[in-house]
């Protein structure tokens, strides 16, 4: 269970959040660019200017509260890749 894990960082970036979502089974597959796409296009995305949670500076990356990040994927509709390339 997610709440029982002690190794989950308090802040994730797009690069660290994608593999964490896969590891926790919240999505089947997703890349950092897939997360950025969701951030740009999903009106429910909770991070950024004018949203309920600001991005946190992490070096030259945008950080997000892991708790809120995981809650977005745990409570929201299924997200992730577009599926297999059929060509």
Image: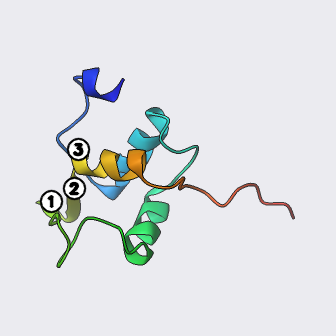
Disc 1: which residue: 59
Q: Where is residue 52 in the image (x, y as percent from the top left)?
A: 17, 67
- Can residue 60 be seen from the camera position used here? yes
The residue at the point 36 percent across, 68 percent down is 44
Which residue is under mark 3? Answer: 67
Of tags 1 and 2, the one toward the viewer is: 2
Residue closest to the far right: 87
The quadrant of the rendering that contains the N terminus is: top left
Which is more N-terminal, label 2 or label 1? 1
Disc 3 crowd, CA 10 A, few/some/many (<14, 14-19, 20+): some
Residue shown at the point (27%, 64%) measured from the top left: 46
Image location of residue 24, percent across then percent down: 43, 33
Nearest-to-viewer mark from 1 and 3 = 3
Image x and y of residue 84, in percent: 76, 55
Local SS, label 1: loop
For label 1, the crowd category at 10 Å Cα-Cα, with few meaning under 14, some 14 to 19 and many 20 or more, is few
Secondary-structure class at tag 3? helix
- Name the residue tied to disc 2: 64
Q: At x 58% / y 43%, what residue is drawn?
A: 28
- Write down the quadrant of residue 55 in the picture: bottom left
Q: How far apart are marks 1 and 2 (CA)?
A: 13 Å
Q: Is residue 84 left or right of residue 22?
A: right
């Amino acid at each position: 269970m997610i709440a029982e894990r002690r190794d989950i960082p308090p802040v994730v970036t797009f690069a660290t959040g994608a593999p964490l979502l896969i590891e926790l089974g919240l999505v089947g597959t997703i890349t950092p660019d897939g997360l950025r796409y969701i951030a740009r296009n999903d009106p429910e995305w909770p991070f950024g200017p004018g949203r309920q949670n600001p991005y946190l500076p992490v070096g030259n990356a945008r950080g997000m509260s892991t708790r809120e990040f995981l809650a977005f994927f745990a409570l929201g509709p299924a997200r992730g890749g577009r599926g297999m390339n059929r060509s």
